[in-house]
Image (cartoon, rainbow, N blue to C red):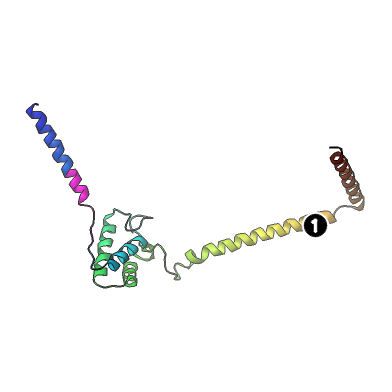
Amino acid sequence: MRPDGVLLRSLILGLLLLAGHGQASSIDVYEFDTREQEARFHALNAELRCPKCLNTNLWGSDAPIARDLRRTVATMLREGHSDQEIRNYLVSRYGDFILYNPRFTAKTAALWVGPFVLLFLGLAIIGVMIRNQRRAARAGDEMISPADAERVARLRAELRRDTSGAASRS
């Protein structure tokens, strides 16, 4: 084997090892005193939204701010803060947007009540449309003259005779 081939292989291997080291160092490891703290940490990170990413929780985001927030949550848990205190702190800094389930306040009332109002309005509109169709059908029956009503009755009777005769022949 030629010496320059060994050098090239060594250089490629070294670059691959360096590239892999960069990937491995981006994984955050958090140490906790108890399993309960670790479970709370995972639950909070799943329910908190990354301020930079639109629909990603803190776990699913690689953004630097999400990494900082995970670190903040871990630190606050180790310091003995409750889940609600951590949520309140983050909401005070980033607003209700950081919560996947925003609180019911005057600002978020439309988010909570709006879908039910729209559902009620949709059902009311459908109900009015059905009622109007039934009224129109009844009014249409009342608008037929007696001569036309007699003709319709004759045609229906004739149709019944034709269909009953055809059914008995088959």
Q: Quadrant of residue 47?
A: bottom left
Q: Quadrant of the C terminus?
A: top right
Q: How many marks?
A: 1
Question: Which residue lies at the image location 30% right of the left edge and 68% below the top edge?
Answer: 36
Q: Name which residue type carries label 1.
A: Arg
Nearest the viewer among 130 and 20 is 20
Q: Position of residue 12 (x, y in %)?
A: 15, 36
State the residue position of label 1: 138
Q: Position of residue 87 (x, y in %)?
A: 34, 68
Q: Is residue 167 magenta?
A: no
Nearest the viewer among 85 and 82 is 82
Nearest the viewer among 45 and 126 is 45
Q: Quadrant of the N terminus?
A: top left
Question: Which residue lies at the image location 86% right of the left edge and 37% below the top edge?
Answer: 169
Callout 1: SS:
helix
Does residue 17 appear to the left or right of 130 in the view shown?
A: left
Q: Is residue 43 above or below residue 7?
A: below
Q: Is residue 22 magenta?
A: yes
Question: Which residue lies at the image location 29% right of the left edge and 54% below the top edge?
Answer: 63
The extreme top residue here reads 2
Q: Position of residue 114 (x, y in %)?
A: 52, 64
Q: Is residue 170 above or below residue 141?
A: above
Q: Which residues are magenta?
A: 18-30
Give the crowd class for mark 1: few <14, some 14-19, many >=20 residues within 10 Å: few
Question: Which residue lies at the image location 34% right of the left edge and 67% below the top edge?
Answer: 91
Q: Position of residue 147 (x, y in %)?
A: 92, 50
Does residue 42 appear to the left or right of 147 in the view shown?
A: left
